Image (cartoon, rainbow, N blue to C red):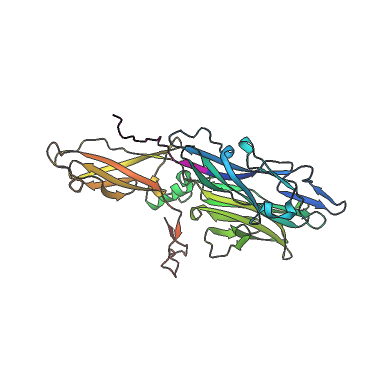
Amino acid sequence: METNRKRIRRDFAPLNVAVAIACDTAYSPLMQVYNGSDGEFEPNRLLSPTIIRPIITAYAADGSWPHPSANSQLAEMKWFVNGKEITTLSSWSGLYEIDTVGSTRGSISVLKNLLPNSEVSLHFEARLVDNRLGVTLPIKTDPVVLSTVDQAEDTYGMSIGESRNIRYNPLIDLLDLHEYKVAHGIASSESGAYDGNQYIRTIPVEMYAGESRMTSGYTVKVYRITDINTQVEITSSDYEFISIAPSQIVIDLRLIEKADYLIKGFVNGKEQAKCQFSVKRVRPAFRCSPTNESSILPMQTERYDEVLVESEGRNIPCPGRALKITWFTDTATKTNVQHNEGDTTLFDLRKAGVKDEYPDDWADVYVKATHKDVHCIASDGSDIYTDESGNILIFN
């Protein structure tokens, strides 16, 4: 006699997917120049296409996904121009090609020369096929801007003395660490470390007229890019910006999760140059371990412990400033008992359920930890809280 049949399947971990976008042609960048005197474009995209590649990477915690590069698994690929699918735009017919093979699958080759002093926004959407689970995942990139400037009219340029892709990791911020130590009486000096990872980030701005750097006669404004075609000017109520001046912009990275910004330079009230940059808070993997391995003494009612946090090969001092660390215990009589939060703990052994005699005289001590969110402005909903010097208070 044959038994009832039971179907079993492999159990795969879900995919973790990261999406980025890049211009692969340094010789044919996103911006081109039109020379009105001879009617030529530089570069001429009909001869040297601009290639924009979506970068799709994926991994599974159980190692079942074969390769980090996932472009070859894309399906239902679509490019959009100013929010409209490119295949529906007659003005783009025959002026683009989409790669369908291998690690560059999804890349678009742009052969279109834009009109002088014009720009368009492109972004990519697709589905990532996960054959392990029989599902597809939605993919959407950030937009990039193609533009053409008229050399005869616009001889201005702008550059910034900072990465255009700023990444902030609070775990390695030595300035934040030092200020934390001063606030808690661990250190006395008011000066902190500025090693390139600090939350106060100064972005030098340079404006050029031709090849000459301007020292006056221009102003700058900063805009937050909120959508493909939407830019909102930064004002005094955008507290992540400490100051905006023609020569530099100072921002507080603690208040930013992920944002794209556009700096515009104006001469005589007319926009003449611009430069884009982005900010993203990163949350690297970490490992926590309680450090007190001593036994519980007779008649002891409280226990002290400290947590050791390691991330990317380094010990993280004062990790409670960036991580929410909550202490727990399991005993013979109680499990998952929550105590307090922070780098250190002093908890009541009786609350934990530790008894005086065998076999109930033990406790397992452990922590649960997550990255803290970005800082927020301290407010009651209408009034902003400040210290005695008028500095705005923030917390996370």
Determine the image quadrant of residue 244.
bottom right
Extreme-left residue of the structure: 357
Q: In this view, does 391 lie above or below 258?
A: below
Of the pair 276 and 32, the residue shown nearer to us: 32
Residue 176 visible (yes or no): yes
Magenta-colored span: 1-17
Looking at the image, residue 122 sits to the left or right of residue 385; the answer is right
Q: How many marks?
A: 0
Extreme-bottom residue of the structure: 382
Of the pair 223 and 148, the residue shown nearer to us: 148
Give x and y (percent) for residue 331.
Answer: 20, 41
Magenta stretch holds residue 228: no
Residue 163 visible (yes or no): no
Give x and y (percent) for residue 348.
Answer: 21, 48
Extreme-right residue of the structure: 38
Give x and y (percent) for residue 275.
Answer: 66, 53
Of the pair 130 and 292, the residue shown nearer to us: 130
Extreme-front residue of the structure: 1
Looking at the image, residue 58 sits to the left or right of residue 53; the answer is left
Determine the image quadrant of residue 269.
bottom right
Magenta stretch secondary structure, dominant? loop
Q: In which quarter of the image is the C terminus?
A: bottom left
